[in-house]
Image (tube, rainbow, N blue to C red):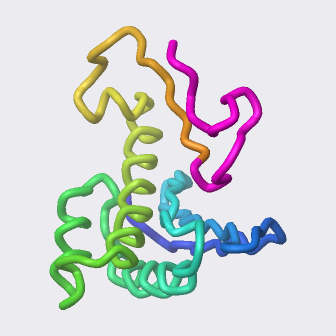
């Protein structure tokens, strides 16, 4: 299997607040076997999305022709081909979005859930948590402070 193209999707939209604009960036990695994987460059809130889009485009050019199943080799190539790979939120977010897409392809190609590839099931249930800190105030169902009620 080979990576044939990578689409960087700027989900520009009209959802905004006084302090930030919600602007997710999605990557779609396409293969010669018709399997596509999706990931997100995690810079959806505030400014920085344009930087993430640019880095994702630059990194994508390195990956064409590689086998998406080789997630470790892909990660190492992205990390080592740039001086900036040793850190930085925007660079790390772009790398992570592409990495997530590779794992999505791997799960689809092997017809197994991703948790199986990452080590298997370790518990039968997990307590859910949702943060609504961006609303800085009340949130429906979570009291006056916006904090989750104790269970």
10 or 70, which lies in front? 10
Q: Is residue 147 magenta?
A: yes
Q: Residue furthest front?
A: 144
User: Which region shows up in magenta?
Assistant: 133-151
* Viewport quadrant of the N terminus: bottom left
* Residue drawn at point x = 57 percent, y = 50 percent: 133
* Residue drawn at point x = 57 percent, y = 22 percent: 149
* Residue drawn at point x = 57 percent, y = 35 percent: 147
57 or 23, which lies in front? 23
Does residue 2 appear anywhere in the picture?
A: yes
Main SS, magenta residues: loop
Q: Position of residue 31 (x, y in %)?
A: 48, 61
Q: Residue furthest right?
A: 14
Q: Position of residue 94 (x, y in %)?
A: 41, 72
* Image label count: 0
Q: Position of residue 139 (x, y in %)?
A: 72, 39
Q: Position of residue 32 (x, y in %)?
A: 48, 62
Q: Residue furthest bottom?
A: 83
* Residue drawn at point x = 34 percent, y = 58 percent: 68
Quarter of the image where one finds residue 72: bottom left
57 in relation to 149, above or below: below
30 or 131, which lies in front? 131
């Amino acid at each position: 299997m080979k990576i044939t193209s990578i689409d960087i999707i700027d989900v520009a939209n009209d959802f905004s607040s006084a302090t930030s604009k919600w602007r997710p960036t999605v990557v779609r990695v396409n293969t010669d076997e018709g399997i596509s994987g999706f990931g997100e460059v995690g810079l959806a809130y505030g400014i920085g999305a344009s930087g993430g889009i640019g880095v994702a485009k630059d990194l994508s050019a390195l990956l064409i022709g590689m086998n998406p199943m080789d997630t470790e080799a892909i990660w190492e190539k992205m990390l080592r081909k740039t001086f900036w790979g040793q850190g930085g939120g925007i660079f790390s977010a772009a790398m992570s979005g592409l990495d997530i897409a590779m794992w999505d392809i791997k799960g689809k190609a092997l017809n197994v859930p991703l948790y199986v590839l990452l080590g298997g099931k370790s518990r039968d249930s997990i307590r859910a948590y949702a943060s609504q800190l961006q609303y800085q105030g009340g949130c429906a169902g979570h009291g006056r402070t916006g904090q989750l009620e104790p269970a």
